[in-house]
Image (cartoon, rainbow, N blue to C red):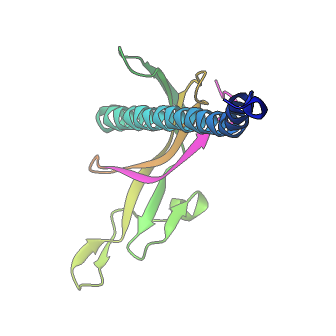
Amino acid sequence: MRKNETGSALIVVLVALLVLTPLALLVSTLATSYQRRTYVFRDSLRSRYALRGGLDIALGRLRTLEPPLALGSQQRFELAEPDSLAVSVRVDRDSDAAVGIDGRVLRGRELSGVDLASVGIDGERRSARLYQALQLYVVQAETAGSASSPGMRLVASVAKTEDGEMLVLGTRYDTALFGSGR
């Protein structure tokens, strides 16, 4: 080895470390970030399925509930099974409505003057009832948050027809931006 080359290997190694260390830190940070996002997505999906299960159970209970909930009343229940999220469900009875054969929704004063048994002719020239009475409900299902995921709430508008059929009119999922309404 020549006298003027001593220590050059050390300088090459130090330069390589200066270049490779930030790259290794970047890869490590990205891997950790992707892993964290995967956990949040998994927990979010798990919450959605738990909430949907709560809605399905509420629909089953409403389908078989006799007598139906009184106007303005509510029913609450908790779902907690092993290896699943705890879900709190609240069902509120809303005012009744009727849907006309033309698609109009009648509530309140509009509904009071309507004969729900009246029959007419539909668009296909068949005899049909002009109005379908609906019992309206609002179903709210909530899960608590965890360290890796915020809490989630499902709000659904549900109607029960005269023949006991349950219709989900609309759903909305909220994530951690709600206060507990209990």
* Visible residue check, residue 91: no
The spot of residue 128 in percent (x, y) is: 26, 73
Identify the residue at image location x=60%, y=60%.
109
Residue at the location (65% across, 37% down)?
20
Asked whether 145 or 6 is in front, the reply is: 6
Pick the front one: 93 or 52: 52
Q: Is residue 94 left or right of residue 67?
A: right
Q: Residue at x 74, y 28 (%)?
A: 6
Residue 59: where, in percent of width, then height? 36, 38
User: Which residue appears at 45% of the width and 22% of the height?
Assistant: 85
User: In the picture, residue 133 is in which quadrant?
Assistant: bottom left
Q: Nearer the viewer, residue 159 or 42?
A: 42
State the image coordinates of residue 123 (x, y, percent, origin top left): 30, 84
Residue found farthest to the left:
126
Q: Nearer the viewer, residue 155 or 138?
A: 155
Residue 174 lies within the magenta run? yes
Magenta segment: 166-182
- State which quarter of the image contains the C terminus: top right
In the rendered structure, the answer to whether residue 64 lies left or right of residue 14 reads left
* In magenta segment, residue 159: no
Residue 92: percent from the left, percent from the top?
A: 53, 36
Against 130, residue 136 (above or below) is above
Most extreme residue toward the front is 2
